Image (cartoon, helix red, strand yellow):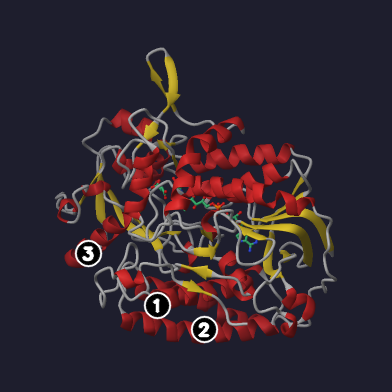
Amino acid sequence: MEVRADYLVLGSGIAGLSFALKAAEHGRVLVVTKKERAESNTNYAQGGIAAVLSPDDSFELHVEDTLKAGAGLCHREAVELVVREGPRMVRELMEWGVEFTKRKMGDREELALGREGGHSRDRIVHASDLTGREIERALLERVKEHGNIEVYENHIAIDLITEHHVFGVKGVPKDSITCWGAYVLDTNSGLVKKLLAKVVLLATGGTGRVYLHTTNPKIATGDGIAMVYRAGGKVGNLEFMQFHPTALYRPDADPDEPAFLISEAVRGYGGILVNKKGETFMEKYHPMGSLAPRDVVARAIDQEIKRSGEPCVYLDVTHKDPDETRAHFPNIYSRCLDVGIDMTEEPIPVVPAAHYMCGGVVTDLWGRTSIKNLYATGEVALTGVHGANRLASNSLLEALVFSDRAFRNSLARARDPDNFPEVPDWSEENVFNAEEWVLLSHDREEIRRLMWDYVGIVRSNYRLQRALRRIRLIAKEVEEFYRRTKVTIDLIELRNLTQVAELIIRCALARKESRGLHYNTDYPEPNPRYQRDTILQKRP
Ligand code: FAD
Ligand code: SIN
């Protein structure tokens, strides 16, 4: 089955939906999303969106905070344009119907601004502690009303359609690959469809599920990065996986479920990290204490846990007014209460968990990838904004700004007449072998554990090399199995997870220094020779 449109959007988080709403004013848009439409990292965002909105703040300060957190790898131009667009993006969301939390100032109301780690001013616009859910709700409502947008739920993109599929391996040009769409599996019917479009936006989000403990929901399997790498496009900086310092610790946690996040906004509100004895420890590591940038806090907690032999540290807000705490964080309060913790009376047990991929598909300042007609925005992209460590609440903003720029840049192309080549149908003569699948399902857990143990917060050459050897064996098994087996969502995701894990390890091995989120005990200091992005591209 073949469907043609002006725009194909892969992903229904903030990056995909904000692009789709603008593109739909100019052409027909298909939005493909692999589970139910709201299921995305966006839906789980708590803290909010960083934007300069108060008189004591400035673009320069937000830019400086971002560059400082990014540890020398941010691209200043990308940071400046994202920061300057902040107020406009917040206004646009409000016009789409997003209801942010307000506060009374005399007889007028204004947006309530929170504080998070690494920010020198209060600038986090939020919707209580459920910002992402409110954004998804409003965007999906607008999408539903729009006659030009068709949403394909329970459809997973398998691969991008490029010359490789049209002309065979020998027909792949060395330099300028072109994308005409994607092969997409309808997970309900098992049918693989060809969706063709003049402009393709990759907005498939993050890769947290590569790690055993993560705040990310099940969709975050790095599909976009794996698809672009397989197609011959550029990806990079994958060594910079951000570990959020404070996920709720549960001794009986099921790693298949996302770890519940205790938002950094709780520390912005006055929460203090303490050990089991109630002693603060962050001052030993950074002058900003509990509000130091994430990489510093996550490593400090890792060290405290290893030193003490305790399974977690604690986040203490018991010194704050209980009514105020409940009013600020109703969702966090009730989720903690569900597991028997009253955060107004006792400290919350917390541990770090994989949270955000700072690297991704390489793009320019218009969201263009190295593949023609293919744009990438949101968490899947490497735009240069986050460098070696993302500043809290800069990702929703980055997604909005780059989706806006990608939309504007792609308008001319979408108005061109379509000139799709003859794309062959998906061919599959393979037979599903259930017995082998049982064996392979263990690979997913093995990869996640391997990445957690060997490619986690603190790394070493020995551990990275060991992880690479093991992942290559798994990759070989998975690829052989993929060739012989009918595609299913589990198999597509396993193949992508394996691919992305290997790419993360290769990026980590290439960076012979410690910088931002990447800490290698064999090179404990930053090295000016490596003050550049790590880029990987498959040889043609
Ligand atoms: P997502 O929102 O993850 O959307 C990806 C979409 O792609 C999904 O619809 C998914 O189903 C779809 N998809 C993936 N692969 C395929 C495929 N192969 N085929 C079809 N569809 C596919 N950032 C902030 O700035 N502020 C915060 O307060 C904040 N809090 C966070 C809290 C949590 C718990 C988490 C996990 C993240 C948080 N982040 C926050 C990060 C932020 O939420 C994400 O970076 C951002 O939402 C990513 O948006 P996105 O549109 O790029 O991807
Ligand atoms: C949080 O609320 O702590 C998450 C913010 C972010 O990841 O930017």
Label 2 CA crowd tier, 10 Å (few <14, some 14–19, many 20+):
many
How far from the left and from the top, in percent, is residue 213? Answer: 41, 63
Name the kind of residue labelled 1 in the image. Answer: Ala
**Mark linked to residue 474:** 2
> Distance of mark 1 from mark 3, alpha carbons?
25 Å
| Residue at the spot of label 1 | 510
Name the kind of residue labelled 3 in the image. Answer: Gln
Name the kind of residue labelled 2 in the image. Answer: Ile
> Distance of mark 2 from mark 1, alpha carbons?
21 Å
Question: Are the residues tagged 2 and 3 within 8 Å (C-beta)?
Answer: no
Q: Secondary structure at mark 1?
A: helix
Q: Secondary structure at mark 3?
A: helix
Residue at 75 percent of width and 39 percent of height:
146
| Residue at the spot of label 3 | 303
Task: Select label 2 or label 1 by which is in front.
Answer: 1
Residue at 51 percent of width and 72 percent of height:
500
Q: Earlier in the sequence, mark 2 or mark 1?
A: 2
